[in-house]
Amino acid sequence: DDAKDLYQETAFRAMSNKEKFEPGTNFKAWAFTIMKNIFINNYRKKVKSNTIMDSTDNLYYLNSGSRQEENGGDTSILIKELAVDRNLRKRRVGISGTNYRSLDNEFQIREAIDSSCKLVNDKENVFEKALIALVLISYIQPFMDGNKRTTRIVSNAILMHYKYCPLSFRTVDSVEYKKAMLLFYEQNNISAIKDIFIKQFEFAVKTYF
């Protein structure tokens, strides 16, 4: 899970700083630099000791020498070698700890995603948009793995698009988060995950802004 959390935070940081990436430079090296520094900072916090940090100025502007690499908009770079299937899943996935069974038909999944997108777009309140995205994508389970991480990234992307601060979810107890999602899966009760969402937004505002 540490590796998946590192991937999620890297993707989040890359999205947050996308304007700092210079087109035509090495995207993989840029993303790797972000990932490397997140890993170092997390390691430093865990061991509570001094760690040698990369002192390169403006790390998000990394240009790896004269060698440039065009990614051609290929979104597979960040999932390469992670053993993650691309596109919508084509078979049922199980969710531990619940009797809830997600859709197992690719066409039904696509229809559910389209309906969810329409619902999000029809809402005028930014927080409603972000919260709905947070629960519905996870509820549909459109991918073989990483669904909850994907929902958090999408939810944050909506907040950031409207100039609101993103949520880190780093202070959320994983068991409580899972219980809140299971409550929505089984009873369509959004109250618990809504409380977590509100508290995380308040924490983000007080801590980071």
Image (cartoon, grey):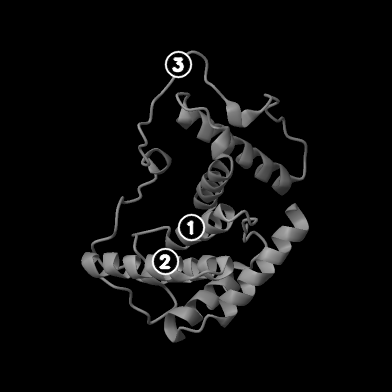
Q: Earlier in the sequence, mark 1 or mark 3?
A: 3
Report which residue position mark 3 lands on. Answer: 67
Residue 50, horizontal then vertical, whole percent = 77, 36
Does residue 4 lie above or below 18 as drawn? below
Of residues 124 and 203, which is closer to you in this image? 124
Measure how far apart labels 3 and 2 are at the Cα level: 39 Å
Helix or strand or loop: what does disc 1 sit on? helix
> Earlier along the polypeptide chain: callout 3 or callout 2?
3
Residue at left 37%, top 36%?
Answer: 73
Query: Residue 23: where, in percent of width, then height?
Result: 47, 27
Amino acid at pointer 2: Ile
At numbered mark 2, what does the secondary structure look like: helix, strand or loop?
Answer: helix
Which residue sits at x=45%, y=57%? 150
Mark 1 residue crowding within 10 angstroms, few (<14) / some (14–19) / many (20+)? some
Specify few, some or many for label 3: CA neighbours under 10 Å numbering under 14, 14-19, or 20 or more. few
Residue type highlighted by circle 1: Val
Q: To which residue does mark 2 refer?
A: 137
**Labelled pair 2, 1 in contact (Cβ < 8 Å):** yes
Residue 170 appears in which quarter of the rendering?
Answer: bottom right
Q: Is residue 134 left or right of residue 167?
A: left
Identify the residue shown where x is 50% and y is 75%.
181
What residue sits right under mark 1 in the picture?
154
Q: Amino acid at mark 3?
A: Arg
Furthest residue in direction bottom, as rendered:
187
Q: Decide if residue 24 is on the left or right side of residue 107.
A: right
